[in-house]
Image: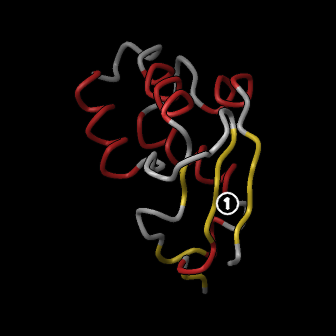
Amino acid sequence: MNTTTITLTKDTIDELVNEETTIVAGLLNLYRHALPDWDKITSIPAYAVQVNRTTAEYIIDRFTVNPNNKKTEITMTWLNSGFGCSRPNVPEWEVFVDNTDIERM
């Protein structure tokens, strides 16, 4: 299996998602951090990028520091486009990446 684990600390999340970050910009920042070759990626299956629930909840909460971001929009966007949380045993503050089915140019 072609997998990678990327550290994603609270401090890093705070830098990537701050008071001025829109939902879309924040998601892009997070994906660019987890997938350094982001600009070459053409398709990511939903299961390919995973964090644990604690990390996901912290990320969602960070989006609320921008008063223009609505909680329901944040939650729906994260559920549709954010990192998955279904893989067991992903440590807190790490991103598990299964590169097997990620399509790149």
Q: Left or right of 32: which side holds 28?
A: left
Q: Left or right of 41: which side holds 35?
A: right
Q: Left or right of 73: which side holds 32?
A: right
Q: Quadrant of the N terminus?
A: bottom right
Whole-percent x and y of residue 8? 71, 37
Count of marks, rendered view: 1
The residue at 28%/22% (across/down) is 70
Residue 75 against residue 2 in the figure, above or below: above
**Residue at the front extreme?**
89
| Residue on which the image places disc 1 | 35
The residue at 64%/54% (across/down) is 96
Helix, strand or loop at label 1? It is loop
Instruction: Give the quarter of the image for residue 90.
Output: top right
Instruction: Give the quarter of the image for residue 5.
Output: bottom right
Residue 20 against residue 38 in the figure, above or below: above
Looking at the picture, the colour scheme in use is secondary structure
Q: Quadrant of the C terminus?
A: bottom right
Residue 105 against residue 57 in the figure, above or below: below
Whole-percent x and y of residue 19? 53, 17
**Residue at the bottom extreme?**
105
The residue at 63%/73% (across/down) is 99
The residue at 61%/68% (across/down) is 98
| Number of residues whose C-alpha sits closer than 10 Å to that of mark 1, classed few (under 14), some (14–19) or many (20 or more) | some
The amino acid pointed to by label 1 is: Leu
Whole-percent x and y of residue 32? 65, 53
